[in-house]
Image (spheres, coloured by chain):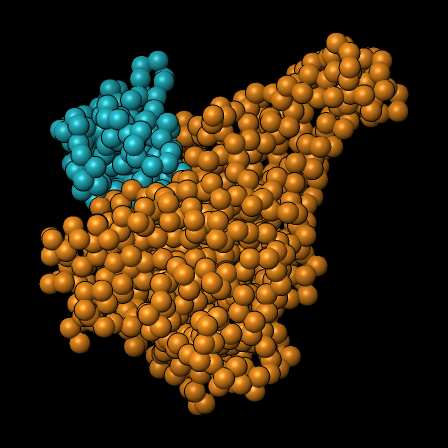
Amino acid sequence: MPKDSGIGASSKRREDVRFLTGAGNYTDDINVHGQAYVHFLRSDIAHGRIKSIDTSTAEAMPGVVKVFTGKDFEGVGGMPCGWEVTDKHGAPMQEPPHPILAQGKVRHVGDPIAAVVADSLEQARDAAEAIDLDIEELPAVIDMKAAAQDGATLVHDDLKNNICYDWQLGETDDAKVDEVFANAAHVTTLDLVNNRLVANPMEPRVAVGEYKRGTDEYTLYTTSQNPHVIRLLMCAFVLGLPEHKVRVVAPDVGGGFGTKIFHYAEEAFCTFAAKACGRPVKWTSSRSEAFMSDAHGRDHVSKIELALDADNNFIGLRTNTFANLGAYLSTFSSSVPTWLHGTLMAGNYKTPVIQVNVKAMFTNTVPVDAYRGAGRPEATFQLERVVDKAARELGVDPIALRRQNFVTQFPYDTPVALTYDTGDYNGTMDKLEAAADLAGFAARRTQSEAKGKLRGLGINCYIEACGIAPSNIVGMLGARAGLYDAATVRVNATGSISVMVGAHSHGQGHETAFPQVVADMIGIDESLVEIVHGDTSKIPFGMGTYGSRSLAVCGSAMVKATEKVIEKAKKIAAHLLEASEADIELKDGQFSVAGTDKSVAWGDVTLTAYVPHNFPLEVEPGLEETAFYDPANFTFPAGAYACEVEVDPDTGQVSIEKFTAADDFGNIINPMIVDGQVHGGIGQGIGQALLENCAYDANGQLLSASYMDYAMPRADDVPFYGVDHSSQTPCTHNPLGVKGCGEAGAIGSPPAVVNAVLDALNSGGKAVDHIDMPMSPSRVWSAMNS
Amino acid sequence: MKISMTVNGKAVSGDVEGRTLLSGFLREHLSLTGTHVGCDTAQCGACVVHVNGEAVKSCNMLAAEADGADVGTIEGQANADGSLNVIQQAFQDHHGLQCGFCTPGMVMSAAALLKENPRPTEAEIRKYLEGNLCRCTGYHNIVKAIMAASGQDVSSIAAE
């Protein structure tokens, strides 16, 4: 029987009511009395040297408060990068400055050159058009392999070349890797592209900066997944402000998908300009502006080689990847192609020798950083495509080949630095085979063929590493931040509870799921527990929400704090019941003395905590506890996906006919929300596989800068999805046994779609090894007819 | 210029520039911030409102064009007693929203669809929602919620 409340219940989301009635409070809904508006003048060329900027005409235009250029920010820091990667020779990555407004050069289309603050947005826009720019256009560096050549034009004149780092993970002895491949019975090789994407949360970014002269305090309202991280970076590295004088609020946020993790120049600008202009300053991104200023995702070009022995065991894996970082280092960009990517190359398989090589490149494009999955989709795509190709070359069943090579003993130390604590890949594959009705595929193919369509089945397995941790390890790997989280459980006198959490909800339903945990632990109604998040003045110092970490990391902190609360409440209950603390049991909101009928209700204990007339002298009044939690390891969700497509042989049009996901997320708090997370991830993965592509021309012009040109998945591009998460191996090292579910769909689905299309073509007599994403009709048709 | 119209049954007026969009008038002049703006090319549909009973992208219509019109927004959709209407309730029951940003437009489009087609098929719903983008849900639970709101049995559709 499904539960109707607490852990394991599909409780309906309480936050929905405000969103469904137009009562949400998104950043653009916030207007501060007296606010001015900023418009950024952005570069319309990819690369150029700024010779002069004349703002005098603009400054004299109606309503203009002030015009800023890079010169106004020479005294403050640039946008920082939060992860220092060390290259394979032991040298630190090349780390060029990233100014708030361009200084000396513009380095991508969209690079902000000047900012006009005016009484109205229209006046700011009008005045920006009157700024006289003299910029000498330089050759654009776009192609990553060309950018790596000696003598290539430099994106940053002060760097020795365009290579941020040349990184390696796994086997360092090239000769040993060569030997594995030389002795292999079969080697499968694949060159592939992981297409550049734009995260595109439906809410564009917004920032409102406010400064109070009387108290010397700043408030920044911003569309962020992690307000404390923004405050720390902005105060310590960019503007040099005292943290205790700065409040960062991320209210209702309309989706993030990674791209709202990062500290952006516009946030620092609005904070700085609020003081400089003597009035609040608001910036609202247009969608077109978002395409050229939000950090992009993916954009890898890779060669992967898989070595197998005569029995089809995987014996070696080698990858060589060019990863695009864009023109500047965004906040966590350097970690994505390295520690969030190379570490996942073992996948679900016990390949003994793995070598991962990554060259990260500066180019004249928008910075690239984490997007849903962040490095893990790129790893999974390479691995699962080459495994599928190997199965086809060897004429073996792709599921059987995968099963044969699965890791089956846990814990398992991979050759690429991770220790998987638990999993059951065969069990999850069993679930997939049943849920996807793979036994019925042949009949469905026959039906498709009767309609003149080619039908294909694509299988994919994935493993991901979530809840990135522990802080001491990531620190050794170059992270410049800790990766713990925090929660404060504040019990009110009448028994209701406010839980202040460092995690941030921008669609994930924390306001519903987190109370399920606390209420379940105490045995009270969920409605008595409220979650507070997104405001540095209200919550403990937490690291926010990304990397599917909220429940595994912040949820663990919340459990620890609740345990402390219960421990103290038991002392009070013991006093009231005149019993020993060791004999007190808490069940269904009642403290009772074991083996007796004596009990006292939760609400009586909480009232006593704040009205301590009859109270144990050795205990402090009040009932409020904080816990910080730093995980012992990553969590390792894993799954198996099946996609069935129909391909129209006349047009190359692909349609997704059936999509089934079997995931092992460990324990699950709210199945409805978990299913929804998987649905959304699959939708984005299908988008990547079939539709989405962020395209630049050779001159660095962004060709896909609006929804007219960037093909977002729409309702009629996708089917209903089947989701099964009954395969559950609980995480072994966090108190809830949870693993994280936010990114799985986006990681697991693109290779499943591509594998399905290739199965359709090859089964239909078209020998095609690979088609790059997005698999548009023209690409599929061309592959079929080449 | 001065304009007046009825919004959610209430007479309103305002002084706007010729270039003021209906979305801007609703959000900035009337503080009806439930209508969202998610793009600048009339693609995303977060700004859908009803103008004289028709679903309209309010970012693509001048406020002046709505002079004298009867406008409905998300703020006016709940039942008279404040409870969620059938469509809103179905979205909550079936987890048809996550971040909530596209939701007002989805609800307004769904209402317009069900008015002209009270029992749409899955395919008809998906086709109708071509002008409404959602990045969170993969559309699964939105389509399911609209089917449920139209009185169709959705119990055989996998997963809540």
Q: Which residue ends up furthest to the top in the rendered image?
A: A597
Quarter of the image that includes the C terminus of chain A? bottom left
* Res. B72 image quadrant: top left
Q: In this orientation, does residue A506 appear?
A: no
Residue A775, compared with residue A635, is above or below; it is: below
In this view, the residue in front, B68 or A355, is: A355
Q: Which residue ends up furthest to the bottom in the rendered image?
A: A151
Question: x, y (%) of residue A662?
Answer: 42, 47
* Res. A762 image quadrant: bottom left
Left or right of A239? Residue A196 is: left
Question: x, y (%) of residue B82?
Answer: 36, 17
In this view, the residue in front, A601 or A403, is: A403
State the residue at coordinates (49%, 64%).
A405
Q: Which residue ends up furthest to the front in the rendered image?
A: A311
In this view, the residue in front, A147 or A6, is: A6
Residue A666, compared with residue A148, is above or below; it is: above
Question: Could you tell me how many numbered marks the image carries?
Answer: 0
Q: In this orientation, does residue B113 appear?
A: yes
State the residue at coordinates (32%, 58%).
A458
Chain for colour orange: A
Left or right of A468? Residue A141 is: left
State the residue at coordinates (78%, 15%).
A595
According to the rendering, which colour does chain B have?
cyan
Left or right of A430? Residue A173 is: right
Question: x, y (%) of residue A366?
Answer: 40, 66
State the residue at coordinates (48%, 53%).
A426
